[in-house]
Image: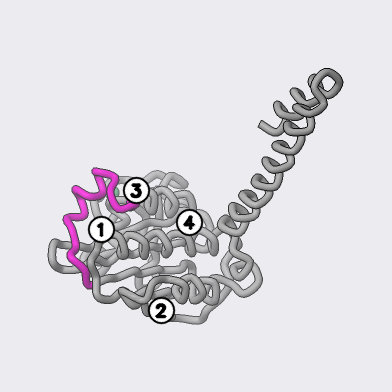
Amino acid sequence: AVAQRLDRAGRAINAEPQRAQTLVGDARQDIAATVVGLREIIADLRPPALDELGLVPALELVIARLPATPPVRLHLEGTVRRLDPDRELVALRMVQEALSNVRRHARATRAEVRLSFEGHALRITVEDDGQGFVPREEYEGGHWGLVGLHERATRFGGSVAIDSAPGAGTRIQIVLPDHAVVQPSAEVIDPVCHARIQPDSAYGSATYNDIDYFFCCPVCQGAFQRDPARYAA
Ligand SMILES: [Zn+2]
């Protein structure tokens, strides 16, 4: 729009100087608006607190800015450490998305975010005491932004597991491995569905009691992470 206005101003500048001046003025306003918009987008993409202070303080800021109800408490487990910048950003965005779902849909009286810094992964739990839902239907219907959570986690070799039932609140567990998916070097068996997984072709992995498990798909990985004791060797 700016370039078009300036082109027209250029053509009009001799014959219609008044119109050219108006067009240039409009173009200037467009640019100012664009700069403001870009600043907002950039701030939104990567909050300064995230780079400077890390995920935990950035998340504390985000939570402090939320409406007072439902109250959101943040718990930390393990030794807090920095992750790579992309993972910190995706972690922050996923918690924001989960909390915005809580606010919009859950009718909760409280919510809780837990960040567990595990050996090779960050585990994020977002829990509320709201009205809950039937996860499968909601997931397939693309509701609640849950599909978005899956996509984001998958991009980082992670997973999302959802525990919810009508009237029983909702718990979302997100696992973000520190690095891309750890891969098996030999054929392994998926502990959930017992599929054979060829070397370097696992969808995801999880460590439980110091043993690595590999999965064929997000459903199996999610099932394992909800209840590892049930499937572990
Ligand atoms: Zn499987």
Label 1 to label 4, Cα distance in Å? Answer: 18 Å
For label 3, the SS is helix
Nearer the observer: mark 3 or 1; the answer is 3
Answer few, some or many: residues within 10 Å of disc 3's Cα (few below 14, many 20 plus, some between 14 and 19). some
Answer few, some or many: residues within 10 Å of disc 2's Cα (few below 14, many 20 plus, some between 14 and 19). some
- Left or right: 2 as drawn, with respect to 68: right
**What is the three-letter code of the residue carrying label 1?**
Ala
**What is the three-letter code of the residue carrying label 4?**
Val
For label 4, the SS is loop
Find out if the beta carbon at label 4 lies less than 8 Å from the nearest ligand 1 atom. Answer: no
What's the residue at 62%, 74% (across, down)?
A: 53
**Can you identify the residue that label 1 sits on?**
223
Residue 79 placed where, x, y %? 51, 81
Q: Is residue 125 above or below residue 6?
A: below
Question: Residue 69's quadrant in the figure?
Answer: bottom left
For label 2, the SS is strand
**Can you identify the residue that label 3 sits on?**
147
**Can you identify the residue that label 4 sits on?**
182
- Left or right: 212 as drawn, with respect to 28: left
Nearer the observer: mark 1 or 4; the answer is 1
- Left or right: 10 as drawn, with respect to 161: right
For label 1, the SS is helix
Question: Mark 4 or mark 3: which comes first in sequence?
Answer: 3
Membership of 194 in magenta stretch: no
Question: Mark 1 or mark 4: which comes first in sequence?
Answer: 4
Membership of 142 in magenta stretch: yes
Question: Mark 4 or mark 2: which comes first in sequence?
Answer: 2
Q: Which residues are magenta?
A: 129-147
Q: Is residue 232 visible?
A: no
The reply to whether dot 4 and dot 2 touch (C-beta < 8 Å) is no
The reply to whether dot 1 and dot 2 touch (C-beta < 8 Å) is no
Question: Mark 1 or mark 2: which comes first in sequence?
Answer: 2
